[in-house]
Image: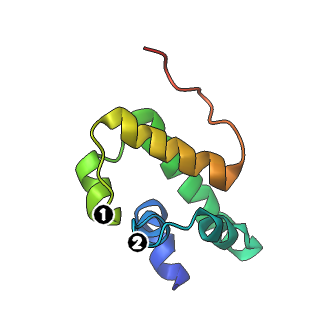
Amino acid sequence: MNDSDAGTDPLRHLLAVYCDVNAFNLRGLKSYLSWPERQSIREKFKSELRDAITNNAISRLEYEKMTGEDFDSDEDLNERLRQIWSSVFEEQLIPPRPRS
């Protein structure tokens, strides 16, 4: 993968590459982001993923176009994004998910 592709819009690019329904690979995503020379990409991806989770910055339709995975509700998509967060960063997202 070309780092310049990930550098311009890391969240969308890396979700499309590592979270495609036919090639779902969170271990690969975590490994890619762990390289010291990719620290800026990691921080931008982390910030954008946090925004996607806490502010619904990615719609179900947009996520489906990127990955081929569809969801019945925004809550289901949010749960998937939280799963990605937990797997890649191994930490709790702050702030926690709002309770209904």
Q: Secondary structure at mark 1?
A: loop
Relative vertical location of residue 27 with respect to residue 43 in this rendering, above or below:
below
Residue 53: x %, y % from top left = 46, 39
Residue 39: x %, y % from top left = 69, 66
**What kind of residue is marked 2?**
Asn
Query: Foreground residue, 57 or 25?
Result: 25
Residue, disc 1:
68
Is the C-beta separation of discs 1 and 2 under 8 Å? yes
Q: Residue furthest top?
A: 100
Task: Residue at 46%, 64% (x, y): give it.
Answer: 19
Relative vertical location of residue 61 with respect to residue 73 in this rendering, above or below:
below
| Residue 56 in view, yes or no | no
Task: Residue at 59%, 48% (x, y): give it.
Answer: 85
Crowding around mark 2 (Cα neighbors within 10 Å: few <14, some 14 to 19, many 20+) is: few
Q: Residue furthest left?
A: 61
In the rendered structure, which disc, 1 or 2, sits on the residue that comes first in sequence?
2
Task: Residue at 53%, 42% (x, y): give it.
Answer: 82
Task: Residue at 69%, 70% (x, y): give it.
Answer: 31
Residue, disc 2:
22
Q: Residue furthest bottom?
A: 2
Q: Secondary structure at mark 2?
A: loop
Q: Quadrant of the C terminus?
A: top left
Residue 7: x %, y % from top left = 51, 72
Relative vertical location of residue 76 with respect to residue 43 in this rendering, above or below:
above
Query: Foreground residue, 44 or 12?
Result: 12
**What kind of residue is marked 1?**
Gly
